[in-house]
Image (cartoon, rainbow, N blue to C red):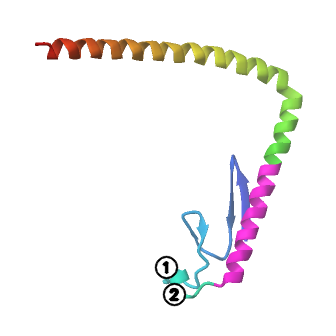
Amino acid sequence: MKNSCEGSSCSIETQSEQVSGKACGCCSESSQNCPVTGCVDPVELVMDGWKQSFFSAMCELKTELLKEKIRKAWGAQLEKSADAVLEAFGTCWKSVLEKSAAQEQLRSRLSKIMFEK
């Protein structure tokens, strides 16, 4: 089994194949729909699930610990930055909403003009 944490994701490679992010646990690559063919070892499948959960939880905990330390070290600066970003993005968002309202008003007026009798 090999595990790694990179960025915001963790991956665990086991002896089981991974299909769409879920361990398959097939005996051979040629097996398709392995749970149906019966070649899956249920104990190995359960163990792989627990291993994946363990390392996923470990990565989440590491992230939480780092968040606490980052907040303690740079929290005040990050709060000020977040306020500045929120203010600027808020202004942009209001502008988008106003533009959308103006376009909707124009659309409504044009529709009335086109279909008036």
Residue lying farthest left? 117
| Placement of the C terminus among the 4 image quadrants | top left
Residue occupying the point 18% across, 11% down:
113
Instruction: Say left or right for 98 vs 106.
Output: right
Q: Is residue 93 left or right of residue 16?
A: left
Query: Residue at image x 86%, y 37%?
Result: 68
Q: Would you call the spot at circle 2 few (<14 residues within 10 Å), some (14-19), or many (20 or more)?
A: few
Residue situated furthest bottom in the rendering: 38
Which secondary structure is most common in the magenta stretch? helix
Q: Quadrant of residue 85?
A: top right
Residue pictured at 58% horizontal, 81% vertical: 26
Picture coordinates of residue 11, whole percent (x, y): 68, 60
Residues in magenta, as a range: 41-61
Residue 62 versus residue 77 in the image, above or below:
below
Magenta-drawn stretch contains 86: no
Q: Is residue 56 one of those drawn in magenta?
A: yes
Residue 4 rendering spot, x and y as whole percentages: 72, 58
- Marks 2 and 1 close (CB-CB < 8 Å): yes
Q: Which residue is mark 1?
A: 33
Label 1 crowding class (10 Å Cα cut-off): few <14, some 14-19, many 20+? few
The amino acid type found where label 1 is placed reads Asn
* Residue 21 place in picture, x, y as percent: 59, 63
Residue 54 coordinates in the image, percent (x, y): 78, 63
Residue sitting at x 78%, y 56%: 57
Disc number placed over residue 37 in the picture, else none? 2
Under circle 1, the secondary element is loop
Q: Residue furthest front?
A: 117
Dividing the picture into quadrants, the one containing residue 82 is top right
